[in-house]
Amino acid sequence: MHHAISRAGLEDLDVLADLAGKYHAFEGIPSSREARVAALGPLLADDSLGAIFLSGDRDRATGYIAVCLGYSIEFGGRDAFVDELFVEAGCRGRGLGRALLEHAAGFLKGKGIAAVTLEVAHANPRGADFYEKIGFVKREQYFLMSRKLR
């Protein structure tokens, strides 16, 4: 199935803030619209931070993926993190998540990115199985840990 996927720009900020709100509600992540707009804007405006890809269009957006760029000594160079991946409930199970991931992977490969990482909730074994099927490897010997600095 063909899915229309394009790189999001600042003109997509309102649509992405709405989609991110749905994703955050789904995952139980507290966020305000203002905080989402403040976080999404720089990523849309600065290629050195990463990219966001939108499925559908502004009038009928069906999902998005946000990839953020970093660096890894372990992986030997620039790496990326799938910060958020969301598909509207009515569009799930049709290959859109896979299409978003593959589109982002192609973009990252083109930038010379060595590896891409993502996280999946322990309460989402179906998601973990899906990611394994498309080449992601569980790193169970590690905990993903975070510390807020502001």
Image (cartoon, rainbow, N blue to C red):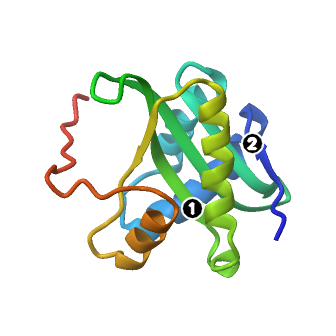
For this rendering, which residue is in front, 100 or 22?
100
Q: Is residue 90 above or below residue 58?
A: below
Q: CA distance from mark 2 to mark 1?
A: 15 Å
Residue 11 located left or right of residue 110: right
In the rendered image, residue 108, in percent from the top left (x then y), is placed at 60, 34
Residue 139 placement (x, y as % from top left)? 24, 53
* Quadrant, the N terminus: bottom right
The residue under label 2 is 12
Question: Mark 1 sits on what residue?
Answer: 86
Q: If you read the primary sequence from the N terminus, does the residue marked by circle 2 or circle 1 appear first?
A: 2
> Which residue is rendered at x = 35% and y = 75% of the image?
124
Residue 81 lies, in percent from the top left, at: 43, 40
Amino acid marked by disc 2: Asp
**Left or right: 143, with 6 as reference point:** left
Of 13 and 121, nearer the camera is 121
| Any part of residue 25 in sight | no
**Which image quadrant for residue 24?**
bottom left
Q: What percent of the width, then of the height, locates residue 116? A: 45, 41
Secondary structure, mark 2, is helix
Question: Local crowd at mark 1 within 10 Å, few (<14), some, or many (≥20)?
Answer: many
Q: Nearer the viewer, residue 95 or 13?
A: 95
> Is 95 located above or below residue 5 in the figure?
below
Q: Is residue 134 visible?
A: yes
Judge from the rendering whether residue 66 lies leftward or rightward of residue 8; answer left or right.
Answer: left
Residue depicted at 61% across the width and 20% down the height: 46
Tell me the amino acid under the disc marked 1.
Answer: Phe
